[in-house]
Image (cartoon, coloured by chain):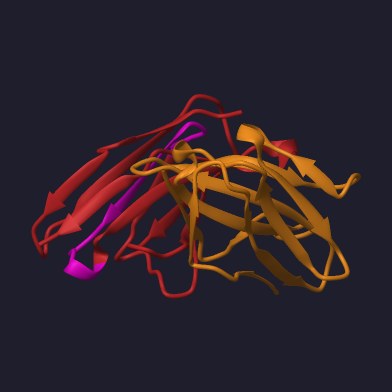
Amino acid sequence: SAVISQKPSRDICQRGTSLTIQCQVDSQVTMMFWYRQQPGQSLTLIATANQGSEATYESGFVIDKFPISRPNLTFSTLTVSNMSPEDSSIYLCSVEGGGSYEQYFGPGTRLTVT
Amino acid sequence: AQSVTQLDSQVPVFEEAPVELRCNYSSSVSVYLFWYVQYPNQGLQLLLKYLSGSTLVKGINGFEAEFNKSQTSFHLRKPSVHISDTAEYFCAVKSSGGSYIPTFGRGTSLIVHP
């Protein structure tokens, strides 16, 4: 299993600013995933982050808007840039449990953009 | 490509009644199937999973699910629900070979009334 923490747990930000979300895992993992969960919606994968390489972004998400860092095997950050109210969501960090095939999730960062 | 359909967006039920949350999937290859639960203001956690073997899978908190290959379904059941089961439930599918990225359904909100 993996225990994942995220900071901040929630934030209220003004339009046009940026927020960096941190994700810390208690064990070394190859891949980390960033999801967005809009109110009443399912999870949408933003990008997959491998240590030492550029993140792979899903359709509809770009690096300029959601830059990701992955400096080591236990840590990653996601920045939401030039925010608008449409970015108000829960942002979830996740890792795969290796041979168990399941996903482990952080508690989420609840972002409100005013 | 694979997809997941959760047929009910909301399921209201009285405490101690049985409940079934429906999930259908489509995939051109063999799959692994998962149910996750998200309690209010928390991240997702695994309820149960089907990888292979017995088609009846038992999970935490008294939940179980049955994999039906011919009907491409993986419905979640509990014989007697508690108030504390009120949460969002997500069905997910992952290809057993190839993509490591799961596809999530839109979620079913289980609301347990006293």
Residue interval drawn in magenta: A71-86
**B51 over A61 or under it: above or below:** above
Residue sitting nearer the eye, B97 or A106: A106
Looking at the image, can residue B20 be seen? Answer: yes
Q: Where is residue B54, by image quadrant?
A: top right
Residue at (29, 44) in percent of width and height: A21
- Asked whether residue A52 appears in the rendered view, the answer is no
Residue B92: percent from the left, percent from the top? 63, 57
Question: In which quadrant of the rendered view does residue A27 lie?
Answer: top right
Q: Could you tell me which quadrant the N terminus of chain B lies in?
A: bottom right
Colour displayed for chain B in the image of the structure: orange
Image location (x, y in percent) of residue A105: 49, 41
- Answer whether residue A95 is magenta in the image: no
Residue B33 pos. (x, y %): 72, 54
Total numbered circles: 0
Q: Left of B91 or right of it: where is A4?
A: left
Residue that sits furthest to the right in the current view: B53
Query: Could you tell me which residue is drawn at 59 percent across and 71 percent down?
Result: B7
Q: Identify the colour of chain A in the image.
A: red
Of B59 and B52, nearer the camera is B59
Left or right: where B58 falls relative to A31: right
Is A84 placed left or right of B43 in the picture? left
Q: Is residue B108 above or below residue B18?
A: below
Q: Nearer the viewer, residue B63 or B92?
A: B63
Taking the magenta stretch, the answer to whether it contains residue A74 is: yes
User: Which is nearer the eye, A56 or B11?
Assistant: B11
